[in-house]
Image (cartoon, grey):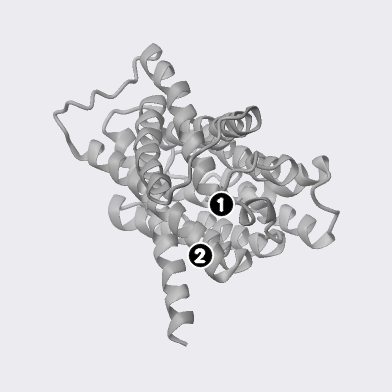
Amino acid sequence: MSDRAGLFGALIVMGAGWGLTQPLGKIAVEGGYRQFGLVFWQVVISAIVLGVICWMRGNPIPLGRAQLWACTVIALIGTVLPGAASYKALVYLPSGLVSILLSLVPMLAFPVALLLGNENFEMKRLAGLAFGLAGVLLIVLPDASLPDRAMVWYIPLALIAPLFYAMEGNYVARWGTGGLGPLRLLFGASVIAALISGPLAVMQGQFIDPRGPWGVADAALVGSALIHAGVYTAYVWLVGRAGPVFAVQVSYLVTAFGVVWAMWLLGERYSLWVWAAFAILLFGLTLVQPRPRLDTIKDTPA
C-alpha cells in the first residue's frame, strides 16, 4: 500500500512540476524575453542536467547516423519548433489557456497515427477527437470566452505545439529512436536544439545575456528548464517502476496543474466558456488516450 501511495505521489509531483513550466514561461516572456532565446537556454540547462545523469550512469551516447538523425528530428519537432511556438503564444494568450490547449496532443496524435499506419481506426478515439474540436470551438466562437477578442487570432499559434508533440510521438512509434533510451535521446536532442536555436536567437536579436543582471524572468527560465529535466527523468523512472499505462496519466495532471498554477501565480481567471472547454477536452482525453508504445524505449538503456 505504501509503495502504491508513493507511486501516486510521484505522479502528482510530476504533474505539478510539468504544469508549472507554462506559468514560468509566461513570466519569462512578460520579462521581455522571446522564443528562441528562451528555447536556447532551456535546452542548454537541460543538456547539462541530463548529460550529468547519463555520465553518472555510465551510458555513453553512440554517434552513428541513426542516433544523430533521431536526435535531430526530436530536437526540431519535439523541442525547437513547439517550444518556440508555445513561448510566442504565451506573449498573447493566458498561460492557463495554453496549458488547456496542450491537452490536445493525444487527440491530434490519432489522425497522424492513422496516416502513418501506427494505429487502427477506433470509433471511440474518433469521438475523442470530436470532443477536442468542440472544446477548441467553445474557446474560439463565443464572444465572451476570452478577456480580449483579439486573442482568438493567436489560438492557431498555440495549437502548433500540440501538433508537433503529436508528430513527435508518432515518429518515435514509427521509426524508433536509433537505439537510444529516453534520457540519452533527450540529451542528444537538447544539444542539437541548442546548436539550432542559439544562432536563431542571435540573428533575431533574442539572445539572453547570462551575465545579468538577473531578475524574475531569468529565475523563471532557469526554474522551468530544471523542472523539465528533473520531471522527465522522474517520468522515465516511473515508466520502469509502474509501467507506461500508469505513467501516461500524468497528462491529465499537467493540464490541471497548469491552470491552477496560472490562477495562483499570475492571477488569471477564465470565463465559463473556457471552463466548459476544459471539461470537454479532459473528457475527450479519456477517449483518445492511446495504449503507450514504449517498447522501442523500454528495451534500451537510458
Q: As drawn, is 110 to the left or to the right of 212?
A: right
Q: Horizontal and vertical percent for residue 236?
A: 51, 57
The residue singled out by tag 1 in the image is 301
> Residue 163 got which mark?
none
- Label 2: which secondary element: helix
**164 lies above or below 109:** above
Identified at 41% across, 35% down, the residue is 43
- Label 1: which secondary element: loop
Identified at 39% across, 65% down, the residue is 13
Most foreground residue, 99 or 224: 224
Q: Horizontal and vertical percent for residue 202?
A: 36, 15
Q: Nearer the viewer, mark 2 or mark 1?
A: 1
> Residue 238 got which mark?
2
Crowding around mark 2 (Cα neighbors within 10 Å: few <14, some 14 to 19, many 20+) is many
Most foreground residue, 288 or 1: 1
Mark 2 to mark 1: distance in Å? 15 Å
Q: Please tell me in which quadrant of the rendered image residue 32 appears.
A: top left
Q: Please tell me in which quadrant of the rendered image residue 39 appears.
A: top left
Q: Horizontal and vertical percent for residue 233?
A: 44, 54
Judge whether residue 278 can be spotted in this image.
yes
**302 lies above or below 161:** below
Kindly identify the amino acid type of the residue bearing the numbered disc 1. Pro
Identified at 35% across, 38% down, the residue is 48
Q: Please tell me in which quadrant of the rendered image residue 258 appears.
A: bottom left
Identified at 37% across, 36% down, the residue is 42
Q: As drawn, is 153 to the left or to the right of 5?
A: right
Q: Horizontal and vertical percent for residue 280?
A: 62, 60
Q: As drawn, is 9 to the left or to the right of 278?
A: left
Q: Report the residue that reaches farthest toward the bottom.
A: 1
Kindly identify the amino acid type of the residue bearing the numbered disc 2. Leu
